[in-house]
Amino acid sequence: MEMFTIVRPEHLNHYGSLFGGQLLKWIDEFAFLAAIREFPGCRLVTRAMDNVSFARGVRNGSLLRFAIERMDIGNSSATYKVDVFARETGSAEDTHVFETAITFVSVNAKQQKVPLPAPLEAS
């Protein structure tokens, strides 16, 4: 699954580049959307995000592309790989700017882990 957004002034840090917390928010949100499409009706919560390392800044006006792919399914959890690419205004090429793996766990109303059902086929 792919998601897109544009970096706007309200997403910038005090140095004028994308605020890392905003990027992590988008990753969590977009990966969650991919997960609930595969496991509709499940109550999923974020369990972990791996390898948070910001290798390069992203400028205002850049188009971000989030490539999200399921990596693993456990008894009660699913892990997704997220690659983030940026295309600066006026450029025709994407640059890989970030990657991580994010794990969601299925819980009941009491926040106790429960087994995941079989995933729906991708549409």
Image (cartoon, helix red, strand yellow):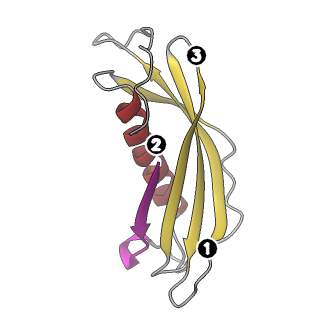
Q: Secondary structure at mark 1?
A: loop
Q: Position of residue 12 (x, y in %)?
A: 46, 73
Q: Amino acid at mark 2?
A: Ala
Of labels 1 and 3, earlier in sequence is: 3
Check the image and report above or below for 40 versus 74: below
Q: Amino acid at mark 3?
A: Gly
Q: Amino acid at mark 1?
A: Asp
On the picture, is 47 further left or further right than 5? right
Mark closer to the observer (1, 2): 1
- Residue at 57% over, 87% down: 91
| Disc 2 from disc 3: Cα separation | 17 Å
**What is the number of the mark on residue 74?**
3
Check the image and report above or below for 60 versus 26: below
Of labels 2 and 3, earlier in sequence is: 2
**Dividing the image into 4 quarters, which one contains the C terminus?**
top left
| Disc 1 from disc 3: Cα separation | 33 Å
Span of residues in magenta = 1-11
Of labels 1 and 2, earlier in sequence is: 2
- Residue at 28% over, 22% down: 41
Q: Which residue is mark 2?
A: 31
